[in-house]
Amino acid sequence: NKQLWKEVEERMKAEEDLNATHDKLKDANRRLQLAYSLISQEKDRLSSRLQGASKAILMNQEGKILGVTDKVLECTGMSRIQIIGNYIYDLVDEESKKELKKEISKANKGLLIPSTFHKICINADSEGYEASLLLLNAKTEKLLLLLG
């Protein structure tokens, strides 16, 4: 009788543990759905912003180019292979290079910087290429997006 009562108590405890685990999993699932929704909204916001931009360059905090839009390829006359892995400083004239380094430093602190970069495009006129730097917080590192 004592053994049977012990087994009943163990089963009741196991059922309580199972119910608690079930509740925790339901809560975790709700939080994952919310996180996914927020990530999806942010991705859509960024996508619409990129589609509206004629030129966009994704780079790391040091200015190393990680990705470009087709419009950047058109205006530079270069291929993705030629651009990706190089530094943004290689696409601007000497005058803009110093300013760009300062602005990347500011953008790394989270400031949105509207700027004009001269000679980023081979067809650029004397007005230059106007763009904004935007800090993105990726999972592994902070990234910069140059939108124009």
Image: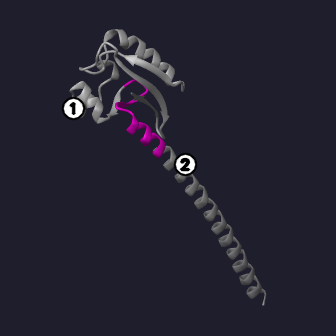
Cα–Cα span, label 2 and label 1: 34 Å
Q: Say which residue appears at 58% left-offset and 54% top-offset.
A: 34
One can see residue 84 in this view? no
**In the image, what residue occupies the spot 27% across and 21% down?**
121
Under circle 1, the secondary element is loop
Q: Does residue 48 belong to the magenta stretch? A: yes
Expressed as whole percent of the image width and height from the top left, the position of residue 71 reads 29, 32
Residue under numbered circle 2: 38
Q: Are marks 2 and 1 in contact (CB under 8 Å)?
A: no
User: Mark 2, residues whose alpha carbon is within 10 Å: few (<14), some, or many (≥20)?
Assistant: few
Q: Please tell me whether residue 74 is drawn above or below residue 104 in the rendered image.
A: below
The one of 78 and 16 positioned closer to us in this rendering = 78
At 46% from the left and 35% from the top, the residue drawn is: 141
- Rendered-image quadrant of the C terminus: top left
Can you tell which quarter of the image residue 2 is in?
Answer: bottom right
Q: Is residue 64 left or right of residue 79?
A: right
Mark 2 falls on what kind of element? helix
The segment highlighted magenta reads 44-63
Q: Is residue 141 above or below residue 25?
A: above
Q: Position of residue 92 (x, y in %)?
A: 32, 17
Name the residue at the top extreme.
95
Residue 55 placement (x, y as % from top left): 34, 30
Q: Which residue in the structure is indicated by mark 1?
A: 79
- Which quarter of the rendering shows the N terminus? bottom right
Is 13 inside the magenta-drawn segment? Answer: no
Amino acid identity at mark 1: Ser
Quarter of the image holding residue 99? top left
Relative to residue 32, is residue 69 drawn left or right?
left
Q: Earlier in the sequence, mark 2 or mark 1?
A: 2
